[in-house]
Amino acid sequence: MKYILIILSILLLNACNPLLLLTKTKEERQEIKDKKKAQKLIKRAIKRDPDILVPDTVLVRDTVIYEGVTADTVFSVHMDSVTLQKEKLIIRYRRIGDTIYLDGACEGDTVYTEKIVLTEKIKYEKKALTMWEEIRINLGNMLLFLLLALLLFA
């Protein structure tokens, strides 16, 4: 029992998060590692050159749906039947015998909101190749083409 506790404590204190290893598949663990590595590289790039972050505005559209409300009540009064309707509110007073039924309903409504959110996005700049870099690439392509031609036709 003592050895099992020691092994479990070593696994729990291990730096590679054993719970993650037990609960995720190999592909999911690799994806998590890749995302962490990408975040680390982005943070390092921002630290080296804070000018790559460009302010950006995003328009967020949100829809809120309010459901209707209904209610009834019953009371005894001598009165005629009446229906009141104003926009989305309907109230009905109905007299049946000496009892009046009061029904009320408010139809649902949809509210659309738009909000402008300020965010930062990373500005990517493609660096132009120098003349020497272009020459090296062209020479490498020519040498590769010659090597393939020699292998195919020799």
Image: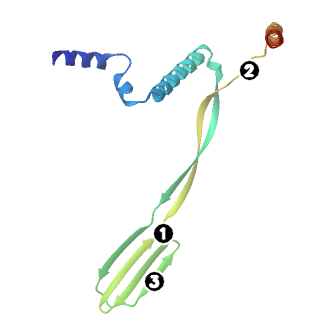
Residue at 52% x, 25% y: name it.
Answer: 35
Q: CA distance from mark 1 to mark 2?
A: 56 Å
Nearest the viewer among 148 and 67 is 148
Q: Label 3 neighbourhood size at 10 Å, few (<14), some (14-19), many (20+)?
A: few
Relative to 67, is 97 above or below? below
Tell me the quarter of the picture where residue 149 sits. Answer: top right
Tell me the quarter of the picture where residue 52 sits. Answer: top right
> Which part of the image, by quadrant, shows the N terminus?
top left
> Which part of the image, by quadrant, shows the C terminus?
top right
Q: CA distance from mark 2 to mark 3?
A: 70 Å
Nearest the viewer among 127 and 34 is 34
Drawn side of residue 154 relative to residue 118, left or right: right
Q: Which residue is mark 2?
A: 126
Residue at 34% x, 26% y: name it.
Answer: 19
In the rendering, at what x and y percent does residue 47 appear?
Answer: 57, 15
Q: Which residue is mark 3?
A: 83
Nearest the viewer among 45 and 30 is 30
Nearest the viewer among 56 and 138 is 138
Q: Which residue is mark 1?
A: 107
Of the numbered discs 1 and 3, the one sitting upstream in the chain is: 3
Q: Secondary structure at mark 2?
A: loop
